[in-house]
Image (cartoon, rainbow, N blue to C red):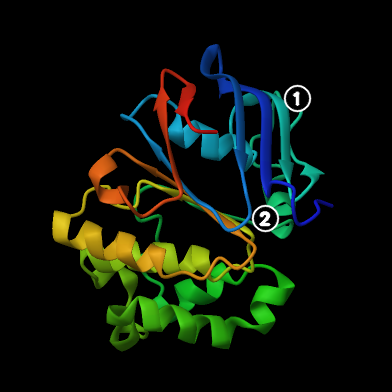
Amino acid sequence: MATADEPILLVKGLSAGYGPLTVLHDLDFAVQRGERVAIVGLNGHGKTTLFRAISGLTGWQRGSILLQGREIGGTRSQGPGRHTHKIVRLGLAHMPQGDAIFPGLTVAQHLDCGAYTRSAWRGRAQRREQLLQIFEPLRKLLKSPVGTLSGGERRMVSLARGLMADARLYLVDEPSLGLAPIVSRAVVDALMQIDLADGAMVIAEQNLALLSGHCNRTLGMHAGMLKGSH
């Protein structure tokens, strides 16, 4: 298990892809406790694949990924997702791009779905109240089916569900995707209010201006490689 002065996430020599396609090329990447890190780049250059590799969801991957000092990477050539539930229990919350919702479930049911681990389930009432103070528009919608909500409201539900986890590392993929600028800013402002304590958050975005001044570091992703302050 990692000590307090060690990175919460340490990636070494990570390559990953799907079928014959290599998307990530020998990446080295670390995230410290308490950090918010922005990864900015155009679609198709590897941001989502990096998050999927950390979560164990790529078609194949090679390299070391340490989460809180525990190895979750290594060589994986088949069975994407087979170990994801174990990685989640180690302290990972992955919020994929898009809404990723169940249209027939209510907002309250979605939030409960996010409390996946035993500790998160025990503390779900307190965690829900904390999140409703941040995502205030959801409070009056708790009994509403998510399929009836606006795009911005659905995105808030998707993010709040991920934040219900008792996680130490939050991966947030394209939170502004498909949203109007004013809604995008509100969503990002809400993410900045999350108390990370000794955890960390990595946000992947196309819009550099949206995250400018909000994160501790900004890395550029281009052609499967990271550039910037590691």
Q: CA distance from mark 1 to mark 2?
A: 19 Å
The quarter holding residue 102 reads bottom left
Q: Nearer the viewer, residue 171 or 193?
A: 193
Q: Residue at x 30, y 83 (%)?
A: 141
Q: Residue at x 54, y 76 (%)?
A: 112
Image spot of residue 124 (x, y percent): 59, 82
Disc 2 is placed on an element classified as helix
Near mark 2 (Cα within 10 A), the count class, few <14, some 14-19 or many ≥20, is some
Image spot of residue 202 (x, y percent): 49, 48
Left or right? Give the position of 198 relative to 103. right
Residue 84 visible? The answer is yes
Q: Earlier in the sequence, mark 1 or mark 2?
A: 1
Image spot of residue 148 (x, y percent): 24, 71
Q: Nearer the viewer, residue 142 or 215?
A: 215
Picture quarter with the C terminus? top right
Judge whether 99 appears above or below 141 on screen.
above
Near mark 1 (Cα within 10 A), the count class, few <14, some 14-19 or many ≥20, is some
Disc 1 is placed on an element classified as loop
Amino acid under label 1? Thr
> Residue 75: which numbered mark, if any?
1
Disc 2 target residue: 88
Judge whether 123 appears above or below 77 on screen.
below
Image spot of residue 127 (x, y percent): 54, 81
> Residue 33: which numbered mark, if any?
none
Left or right? Give the position of 215 relative to 62. left
Residue 207 visible? The answer is no
Query: Which residue extends farthest top?
Result: 20
Left or right? Give the position of 116 relative to 140. right
Q: Residue at x 50, y 63 (%)?
A: 162
